[in-house]
Image (spheres, rainbow, N blue to C red):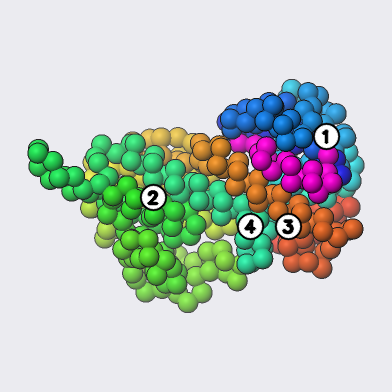
Amino acid sequence: MKIGIPKEIENGETRVAVIPAMISGLINDGHEVHIETGAGETASFSDADYEKKGAKIEKNVEELYQNAEIAIKFQAPQMNEAVGKHEIDLLREGAMLLCSLPPATHETLIPKLRQHKTSCFAMEYIPRITKAQSMDVLSSMSTVAGYKAVLMAANQLGKFFPLLMTAAGTIPPATAFILGAGVAGLQAIATAKRLGAKVEAFDPRPVVKEQVESLGGHFVEMTMPEDAETQGGYAKQLSDEFLQKEREAIAARLPKVDALITTAQIFGKESPLLVTEEMVKLMQPGSVIIDLAAAEGGNCELTKANETIEKHGVTIIGAVNIARLIPVHASQMHSKNITTLLKHLLQNESLDFGDEITKGACITHEGEIINEMVKQNFS
């Protein structure tokens, strides 16, 4: 089949959906790969790199979309101002599209996808099961974000992270406090520990205590509910009463915290408020908060998405989609995820909607909404 990989047009996006190293695998599977000129430049991949692997460079993005039976993107489709058309309108009718499709984009994009009879597969909706681990782009990007968040905190903090024994005296290690021990949180714990910080972590799921401690972090405990996560592995939205207990446990640690990294998110919903303005006041002057939940409202009451502010002597960074700040490896991980999904989808002569992965990841097909979770929002 003919595969088209366009250049990402979202403002500030540096990643590319598929890197050159993955092109030969697609070609060996019998596909013809076309990629828009300059698609990989911001991730340090040249057109020549793609050509060496057998891809054909396409200068005209409209022709790229029209000729593609399968289009592969990183971000959700949007208006392409350069040609004055929406990316969905550029697609040929009935084409397959693999991309991101966050819940916030559904109201606008799903009607267009249905109109074009696009078979759209959204990376966020791949079931979180063992069989699909190699396709899990949420985990991949969370890994990148958790790592980068710690580097941002270390860069902003006016202190060393590690313990230093110097002729000028002993300098104690900084204390990093990680809220949420999902993929991003665990990567943040590991990275902060590698940098020499004293690391503490909090999560409402007691099952992650062993994971936190295996990475060298201290797990902050409190009375936990038994059903803090869904069967799909996502965190559940908990009661206001329990959130208040969480805040009390967190607040008790804040006076000694230098770097607070918040990662608590609930898929498709607003992020839980874990750190109020009064709690920020408990932190030492010069401390820093990196809020990885900023795009969904933030875990900190003072967070402003895509902004860095200072309040009560504390710097608060509303980190949105910071995986794009490490475009080489973020693109590499995404490439593996999305090409593995494509190979899975095409293993039979036709799409198998009896398969858990295929049905879960598919948002629209032949004008109909397939994903049950999404379908409920359009009933």
Q: Quadrant of the C terminus?
A: bottom right
Q: Are marks 3 and 4 in contact (CB under 8 Å)?
A: no
Which is nearer the N-term, disc 3 or disc 2?
2
Which is nearer the N-term, disc 2 or disc 4?
4
Secondary structure state at the residue bearing disc 4:
helix
Residue displayed at 48% across by 67% down? 239
Q: Amino acid at mark 1?
A: Tyr
The residues colored magenta run: 15-32
The circle drawn on residue 100 is none
Q: Amino acid at mark 2?
A: Thr
Query: Quadrant of the rendered structure where residue 309 is?
Result: top left
The circle drawn on residue 65 is 1
Count of labels in the image = 4
Secondary structure state at the residue bearing disc 1:
helix
**24 is within the stretch colored magenta:** yes
Measure the alpha-carbon separation of dots 2 and 1.
40 Å
Number of other residues with Cα within 10 Å of mark 2, as a class: few under 14, some 14 to 19, many 20 or more? many
Secondary structure state at the residue bearing disc 3:
helix
Q: Position of residue 339 (x, y in %)?
A: 71, 49
